[in-house]
Amino acid sequence: MGRPRKTNVRRDASGKSRGEEGIHPETLTARERRLREAGVPLTFRKMEMTKLGWREVTKRTATDRMSGFTLGILRLRGKADPGGISEEQFNAGDGFCRIVHQHAAVMGYRLSVPSPSLMLMGLGGSSHEDDAEQIARVRRRFQRCFDALMEVSRTHSKRVWQVTYGVCVENWSPGQLSGEDYGSLRVGLNALRKVV
């Protein structure tokens, strides 16, 4: 008698395993705990196409890619929530995170945390000139973001830079943020929207 078949794997027509599917149950449990602490509903309703047509289904919020990092959790809260952000603010913060990670790659320094974004772009080129051009482009984008955040930090407070970088790049927990921090984050994200 062999070992029991795993139930959470994709299989082809012959029944052969094609790899595990979904998110590990322990990861889902940890995400649900974070979501509960952040005040995000643990389920949502969604329209899904089936063979018989459209139907409404209930999904676990923890399976959403955004539930795995703070910026995504704040987006899941929604802009009406005092701790939530809009889709445009989320996109600005996510773009800023990618820019910071690209800048680290081209400048040769390491960040202490990996990017929560699943779509980091790698560098690559066919010639030295292409690489130099791409490095210059990444440096310009990073400089525009940095300048925008420094400008609003001068008019508001240096906390804008700290919180925006902390949430977008270092993935600070929502529990670490005060009401004022949420305001500072929104100021930073709004400044980034103009340059990302």
Image (cartoon, rainbow, N blue to C red):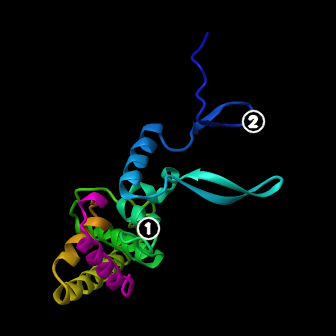
Tell me the element at label 1.
Answer: helix
- In this rendering, does residue 173 appear at all? no
Few, some or many residues within 10 Å of mark 1 (<14, 14–19, 20+):
many
The picture places residue 101, in percent across and down from the top left corner, at: 31, 66
- In this rendering, does residue 187 appear at all? yes
Residue at point 38% right, 81% down? Answer: 196
> In the image, what residue type sits under mark 2?
Ala
The picture places residue 109, in percent across and down from the top left corner, at: 21, 63
Q: Nearer the viewer, residue 110 or 80?
A: 80
Residue at point 81% right, 52% down? Answer: 51
According to the picture, the residue beneath numbered tag 1 turns out to be 75
Q: CA distance from mark 2 to mark 1?
A: 39 Å
Mark in front: 2 vs 1: 1
The picture places residue 22, in percent across and down from the top left corner, at: 54, 44
Q: For residue 62, which numbered disc appears in the image?
A: none
The picture places residue 115, in percent across and down from the top left corner, at: 34, 60
Q: Nearer the viewer, residue 91 or 13?
A: 91
> In the image, what residue type sits under mark 1?
Arg
Few, some or many residues within 10 Å of mark 2 (<14, 14–19, 20+):
few
Tell me the element at label 2.
Answer: loop
Residue at point 18% right, 75% down? Answer: 159
Give the extent of the magenta segment.
174-196
According to the picture, the residue beneath numbered tag 2 turns out to be 13
